[in-house]
Image (cartoon, grey):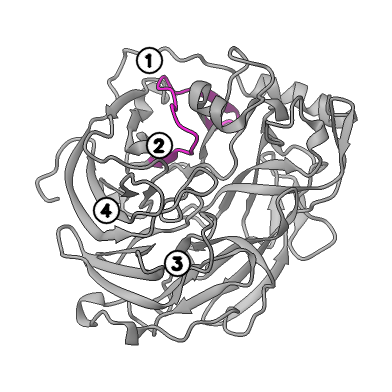
Amino acid sequence: MVSGPARALAAVLVVAVPWLGTTPAAASPAPPVTRLGDTQLDPTGLYFVSYNGLVNGTSYQQHGLITHGGFQYAAWYTGSRHAMVARRELPTGAWETVRLPHQLSTNDSHNSISLGVSPTDGRLHVAMDTHNNPIFYVKSERNLVSNPARVSWSAARFGALQHTLDGVDLGSITYPRFAAAPSGELLFSYRTGVSGNGWSELAEYDGTWHKLGKWSSASGAYTFHRATSNTRNMYLHGLTYEPGGRLHAAFTWREGNPAVLCHRGGVTNHDTGYVYSDDRGRTWHNGSGTRVATTGSGTLVGIRSPGLVVDPLDVDHGLMNDESQTVDSTGNPHVIISYVPGRFTGCVTDFARQRRSHGRALHLYRDAQRRWHKRELPVPLNAYGRSQIVLDAADNAYVVMPYGRIVAASKATGWTDWTLRFDGAGLDAHGEVVVDRTRTADGVLSVLYQRRSTGTTPSPVRVADFRLGLIDSRH
C-alpha cells in the first residue's frame, strides 16, 4: 500500500471520483461524425515500429498537426529520414512541402516532431529527434504564419538547425511540447533526466527564449508490495491553456523501482494527478486552489504535494502515460486515461499484450463544483496505444482511439452517451494517430495517421478530415 498520508488522501478522493458505469444514456444521441476527405502528405513516410509505436504518430506530439491563420501545418519524417514540414490553405488547399536540414538520428519512436506557433511574431517553431539527448530545433523567419497566403513556402524561410533554443541550453531532453498562451507567449515543456528519475521543465518564448526551470520533483517515497521507490518522473497528458489564460496539466507518475510491481512485466505508472497555473507556469496550484509549487524553486510538484490525485490507481493495472487532455468552454479539464480494469486482472504481467486484450479508455472530467467524474468508454482498445480527446464549440466530446476510430458523447447528457461514430474503415492506420486540437473550433477534426507496413518499408502518411456534429456546407 501507499504509506501514511497518501493512503488517507486516496481514500477521500475515491469518493470525489465516482464510478459512473458504461451504459450509454438514451436522453440525447451522441453527436455525429462525418468524413469529409483524406489527403496524402507523403507516399513514402519513414516506417519502423519502436516501443509499439511509430515516430510519425505519437500522442505526446504537441503539436504534430496545427492550424493558424487559416492554414494547417504538419510535420513528419520521410523515407530518407529527413524531417518534413508542410502547409495547406484550409479547407481544401493542396499541401506544400519543405524538407528541413535534419535526418532522424535513431530508430526510436520517442523522437517525434512537435510544432509551435508564436503569435506575437508569426514564427513556426520545430522541435525534433529527442530522447535523452540535446534538442534539434529550427524556427522560421518572422511572420511566416501571420499572413501565409502572401508568403511563399520554402526551406529558405527557416533558420539554421540548432542544439539550443537560440543559445538557451536545455541539456538532454525528451518529450518536447509547445503551448501558446492567449497573451501571445509560447511555452516549451520538456523532461530532463530519465524514465523513473526525471523532472518536468519549462522555457518560454516572447521574442526571446527564457529558461524557467524545473516544476516537478523526482524525489519522495512510494511504497507498494512492501517495496519502496524513491525516484520517479511526471508524465504529462498535456499542457492546455484556456482562453482566460489558465494553464492546465493532468499527469501520471512513473516509479523508478520496479520492485513496487506485482510482476516485472507490468509498468510502474500510477494515479492521475492534476494541477493548474495562472501565471504561465511560474506557480502551480492543486484543484482546490492551494499553491503547491513554484517553478525553478525548492518547492516543486511532487508525490507528497497535497491534493494532487484526482483518480487513484495503483501500479498493477498497466496505466498508460502521456495520453491526452483538453479544456471545455467553462474552464474545466477533460482527460483520457487507459488501463486494464480490475475486473480482468489485479496484476498486469505483460503490459503490451494485456492492454491489447483487456485495455479500456476512460473519460475523466471536472464539473463546476470541482468534483471529478469518470466513465469507461464502451469500446475496447484492442490496441497497445493511446487515445486523443477533443471538444467541439458546444463542448461535445470526441475521442480518437488507436487505428483512427472515433467515439463521441454529448455535453447534454453529461458525456454519458458514448457511441462509436467512425470505425476507422479505409484508414489502415498503424495504431496511435495525431489530432489537430486547434481546428476543432471550426467544427472540423483533422487526424494525421500512417498506414500499416512491415519491417522498415515506407508507407503513406495522410490526413483525414471529419465534420463534427451536423454538416455545414461552408466546410
Find residue 318 and report its image quarter: top right
Q: CA distance from mark 4 to mark 3?
A: 20 Å
Q: Residue 474 at x, y = what percent?
A: 11, 50
Among numbered discs 2 and 4, the one appearing first in the sequence: 2
Q: Are marks 4 and 3 in contact (CB under 8 Å)?
A: no
Q: Residues within 10 Å of mark 1 (few under 14, many from 20)?
A: some
Among numbered discs 2 and 3, the one appearing first in the sequence: 3
Residue under pointer 4:
462
Asked if residue 413 shows in the view, the reply is yes
**Element under label 2?**
helix
Give the extent of the magenta segment: 364-390
Residue under pointer 1:
24
Q: CA distance from mark 2 to mark 3?
A: 24 Å
Q: Residue 444 at x, y = what percent?
A: 25, 47
Q: Amino acid at mark 1?
A: Pro
Front: mark 1 or 2 = 2
Q: Amino acid at mark 3?
A: Gly
Q: Are marks 3 and 1 in contact (CB under 8 Å)?
A: no
Residue under pointer 2:
402
Q: CA distance from mark 1 to mark 2?
A: 21 Å
Q: Amino acid at mark 4?
A: Arg
**Residue 365 located within the stretch drawn in magenta:** yes
The quarter of the rendered structure image containing the N terminus is top right
Q: Residue at x 34, y 28 (%)?
A: 410
- 391 is higher (above) or lower (below) than 438: above
Among numbered discs 3 and 1, the one appearing first in the sequence: 1
Among numbered discs 1 and 2, the one appearing first in the sequence: 1
Q: Amino acid at mark 2?
A: Pro
Residue under pointer 3:
116
Among numbered discs 4 and 3, the one appearing first in the sequence: 3
**Element under label 4?**
strand
Q: Seen in the image, is 335 located left or right of residue 68?
A: right
